[in-house]
Image: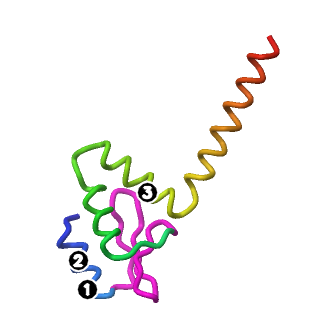
Amino acid sequence: MSQEDFRTWFRTGSRLPLAVRGHSFSLSKDGLVTVDGGKFVYEEALQLVMMLTSRNPFSQINATMVIWERNGNLRLVVIALAVILAAAVLVIARR
């Protein structure tokens, strides 16, 4: 997947989803790009494609975090980690 492939996919207005490194890109009726349920404008989606196809693993992780933040999954991950941390503190404090 290259940037030019993404641009071509966007320009054609294809209703078929585009898969990039395990993430599903699709066009919504209002002209936004939906990535795993989160809505992005074209420039943001292009930036995500560049980050996901980068050879830098930190860039790929950062793109995944941006997608998770936009579609609400990051909030659930943070809450789950907070609950686990609180449980660990309680277990240690009771000893």
**Disc 1 + disc 2, Cβ < 8 Å:** yes
Above or below, 27 against 82 in this view is below
Give the CA distance from mark 2 to mark 3. Answer: 20 Å
- Residue matched to label 3: 66
Q: Residue at x 24, y 44 (%)?
A: 56
- Residue matched to label 2: 7
Looking at the image, is mark 2 or mark 3 earlier in the sequence? Answer: 2
| Residue 31 found in image quarter | bottom left
Above or below, 20 against 88 in this view is below
Which three-letter amino acid code belongs to the residue tagged 3? Answer: Val
Looking at the image, is mark 3 or mark 1 earlier in the sequence? Answer: 1
- Residue matched to label 1: 11
Q: Which residue is nearer to you in this view: 1 or 59?
A: 59
- Label 2 element class: helix
Which three-letter amino acid code belongs to the residue tagged 2? Answer: Arg
Give the CA distance from mark 3 to mark 1. Answer: 24 Å
Q: Left or right of 54: which side holds 31?
A: right
| Residue 10 found in image quarter | bottom left
| Residue 78 found in image quarter | top right
The residue range painted magenta reads: 14-37
Q: Position of residue 11 (x, y in %)?
A: 25, 85
- Label 3 element class: helix
**Disc 3 + disc 1, Cβ < 8 Å:** no
- Label 1 element class: helix
46 drawn magenta: no
